[in-house]
Amino acid sequence: MPSEFLKSAPGLPPDQTGDVRDVVQIMLARLQAGGDTAACDYARTLDGWDGDIVVAQDQLAGVAAQVPSELKSAIRYAHDNIRRFARAQRASAQDFETELRPGLTVGQRQIPLNAAGCYVPGGRYAHIASALMTITTARAAGVAHITACSPPRPGIGIAPSVLYAMLLAGADRILVLGGVQGIAAMAQGLFGGVPADILVGPGNQYVAEAKRQLFGPVGIDMLAGPTDLMVIADASADPARVAWDLSGQAEHGYNSPVWLVTDNRAFAQDVMRMVPDCIAALPEPNAAQARAAWDDLGEVILCDTPGEMAEIADRYAPEHLHVQAADLDWWKSRLCAYGSLFLGENAAVAFGDKAAGPNHVLPTSGAARYTGGLSVHKFLKTVTWQKVGNRALPDLARATATISRHEGMEGHARTADIRLANLAPPVKMVANDQN
């Protein structure tokens, strides 16, 4: 029997992607031409910020005193987990060399990027975890210069808790800038900074579009859209816990999809009944955001078998995939399209978002079909090298010349021929005749 939608998503009205693209293009052009002055103008106009753009060292020195001890302890705990995981990833990226044939030696090097720009969102929430996830990972990769930016809060600037996290994670420079102007400032190295080789971190549609338009001369982590979650659950799961997991993720906003895939109808109906109550228990405006996401984008899909459930998960390729079902080892080996996998009822998605260690900057909108999330590998260049000795040269040159001429590339062929022609013949050893 094909899967059945017990709750389908009516969807959102068409977005205004074209308008966003045009606005960002104009802003980037002005920022390219106007530099620091244009960035300051946008900070005043869009964020109401007229203070210093670069956070001064004396302000950073006193920021720890402004953060409650309990919060500082939690931030240090999360930072330690994120750093340990990132360092383990870095250790997995190895240089090597190997001799493919006698005289033909090849290899690879892992070279950290020189400069990274880490965007830390603002808006409704103070994104402490995003500061830790991006900056800590760049530092573990060995990036030499790290600039971070975040939009200001009126009359405050960057929240002290976010500044504390940025400083702990290892940012070299911190800019009180958000949106397109923050992205452009890091890309161009405005306000005395080093131009970024890569721009990373989540943000709104304007931030995402700015990264998209700058991509090419500057690297980016990914083109991220609204966050999403899929829960796979069977009858062994707790419906109340699953209802809260869906509701908690939905509070990200009206455009954040949440999906439940299950093989048990009664379980699905229980969850569907509980979600509205969970959402109603949230404070405003969180409840309104979560209600809109559930009503417009929430789906509940009933399947016959675990295999069908896995097929749907692979097709959706969710950013967060939470399995609350029996035989977790089977699910771990079977599932193959997700940003991050959460195995078992204890592995709350919020743990991964905030403090568990693996990165929370993840592919959205189905991009997990072809890419993973932010990691130290994004801050490394895997480059290759080769060295050719005399023993390897004859066969290599002949093969290269043959392929080149077949392709019609005579110049390539002759670069091989000349090396073969100039190869010195081996020196013959002649025994001395004593007679």
Image (spheres, rainbow, N blue to C red):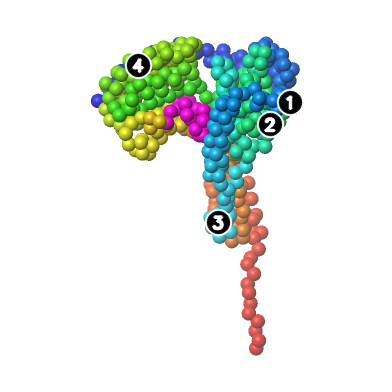
Q: Quadrant of the C terminus?
A: bottom right
Q: Find residue 99 and name its label.
A: 3
Report which residue position mark 4 lands on: 274
Q: Is residue 360 magenta?
A: yes
Q: Where is residue 6 in the image (x, y as percent from the top left)?
A: 31, 18
Q: Where does label 1 land, which residue?
A: 58
Instruction: Classify residue 208 by image quadrant.
Output: top right
Q: Which of marks 2 and 3 is in front?
A: 2
The N terminus sits in image quarter: top left
* Label 2 vs 4, first from the N-terminus: 2
Ranked by sequence position, the earlier of labels 2 and 3 is 3
Cα gap from disc 2 to disc 4, whole angstroms: 46 Å
- Rounded to the nearest whole Å, what is the CA distance between mark 4 and mark 1? 50 Å
Amino acid bearing label 3: Glu
Give the residue displayed 51% in from the left and 34% down from the top. 357
Amino acid under label 2? Asp
Kindly identify the residue that appears in the image at 46 percent across and 32 percent down: 340
Most extreme residue toward the left is 1
Marks 4/3: CA–CA distance = 62 Å
Q: Does the magenta stretch include residue 233?
A: no
Q: In which quarter of the image is residue 132?
A: top right
